[in-house]
């Protein structure tokens, strides 16, 4: 689907134009164009990226092919940015959607293979607010994209707290290890995405390119700071998760040691009975106790006394 928005003096004057009309508007230097490619077909992608804007083939290739890491490329007349939106649900876990931006002096082209909340919100605002340039629209999109990270962070934080409570609970769940590994992978992916995006926005915030006006640099610096805070939060959550994992391993080792201690104590308690029974079970020719009328009582008394002494000894050692 191709969505187009035409702005004149910061006001929306047209939208969803035909391809021929887009080419005519593209030639008018007094207008600002935002073209959004939402789940486009191959023909729509080719018509806009190649036919209307004539972007570099390498930029088009990077746009169409999924990219795992954010980046920014300067093609002199325009910037090509690869960013990632995130989503998180308990059912589908951590998911990302790529958002590609072509930022020119008087146009912005966005491309995403799946619907994005940030783009939908920016479209709603396009008809209500005043857009003063493609760099302003690009900042709005990136700001909304970063804001949606907060929801993901809240969901991951809630899951982290649940894991911590489960680890500290008396009864541990069998699937806890799988959950720990899954959440750890989510945090690792989040850190791997946020850090490069912060570097991309940092380049825009420094004013290294002429396509971002100086008056917008403070806004991009604020966006960079937000990404830095997200990265710090992700690092802290990851460290908390590793601490929870260490606690779980220590707890599992302690429980295993307690089990081994109990089995050892049980073996020690039964040892006197085994020794006495084994002694009297031997076929000796001369064993006075066997011919004594009190031999059975003697054997039982010896077994009972030695067992009690063993129990007292183990209690002093705090094995019971």
Image (cartoon, helix red, strand yellow):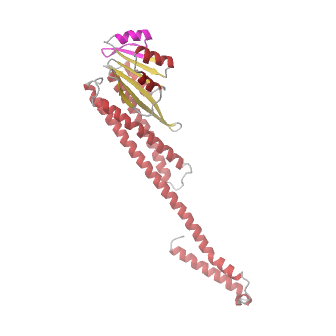
Identify the residue shown where x is 49% and y is 54%. Answer: 248
Vertical position of residue 197 compared to residue 47: above or below: below
Q: Nearer the viewer, residue 75 or 148?
A: 75
Query: How far from the left and from the top, in percent, is residue 283?
Result: 74, 83
Q: Examine the structure image and report whether residue 18 is included in the region drawn in magenta.
A: yes
Tell me which segment is drawn in magenta: 4-27
Q: Residue furthest left?
A: 214
Does residue 278 appear in this view?
A: yes
Query: How far from the left and from the top, in percent, is residue 149?
Result: 41, 35
Q: Examine the structure image and report whether residue 193 is included in the region drawn in magenta.
A: no
Does residue 18 appear in this view?
A: no
Query: How far from the left and from the top, in percent, is residue 264?
Result: 58, 69
Identify the residue shown where x is 42% and y is 49%. Answer: 240
Vertical position of residue 10 compared to residue 286: above or below: above
How many marks the image carries: the answer is 0
Vertical position of residue 236 compared to residue 97: above or below: below
Vertical position of residue 156 compared to residue 291: above or below: above
Give the left or right position of residue 273, taking residue 227 as reference. Answer: right
Q: Quadrant of residue 81?
A: top left
Query: How far from the left and from the top, in percent, is residue 197?
Result: 37, 34
Q: Quadrant of the C terminus?
A: bottom right
Q: Nearer the viewer, residue 139 or 282?
A: 282
Q: Nearer the viewer, residue 116 or 184?
A: 184
């Amino acid at each position: 689907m191709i969505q187009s928005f035409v702005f004149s003096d910061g006001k929306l004057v047209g939208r969803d134009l035909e391809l021929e009309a887009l080419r005519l508007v593209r030639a008018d230097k007094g207008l600002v164009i935002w073209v959004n490619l939402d789940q486009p077909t191959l023909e729509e992608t080719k018509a806009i990226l190649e036919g209307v804007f004539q972007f570099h083939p390498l930029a088009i290739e990077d746009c169409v092919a999924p990219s795992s890491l954010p980046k920014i490329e300067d093609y002199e007349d325009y910037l090509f940015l690869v960013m990632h939106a995130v989503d998180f649900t308990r059912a589908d876990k951590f998911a990302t959607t790529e958002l590609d931006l072509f930022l020119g002096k008087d146009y912005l082209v966005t491309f995403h293979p799946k619907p994005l909340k940030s783009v939908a919100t920016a479209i709603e605002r396009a008809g209500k607010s005043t857009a003063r340039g493609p760099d302003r629209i690009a900042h709005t999109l990136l700001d909304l994209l970063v804001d949606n990270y907060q929801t993901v962070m809240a969901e991951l934080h809630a899951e982290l707290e649940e894991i911590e409570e489960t680890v500290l609970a008396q009864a541990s769940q069998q699937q806890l290890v799988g959950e720990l590994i899954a959440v750890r992978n989510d945090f690792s992916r989040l850190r791997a995405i946020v850090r490069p995006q912060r570097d991309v926005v940092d380049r825009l915030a420094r004013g290294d390119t002429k396509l971002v006006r100086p008056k917008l640099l403070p806004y991009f610096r604020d966006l960079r700071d937000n990404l830095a805070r997200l990265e710090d939060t992700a690092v802290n959550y990851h460290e908390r998760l590793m601490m929870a994992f260490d606690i779980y391993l220590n707890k599992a080792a302690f429980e295993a040691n307690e089990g081994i201690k109990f089995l050892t104590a049980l073996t020690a308690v039964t040892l006197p009975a085994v020794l006495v029974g084994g002694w009297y079970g031997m076929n000796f020719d001369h064993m006075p106790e066997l011919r004594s009328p009190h031999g059975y009582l003697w054997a039982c008394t010896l077994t009972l006394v030695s067992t009690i002494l063993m129990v007292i000894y183990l209690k002093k050692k705090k094995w019971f």
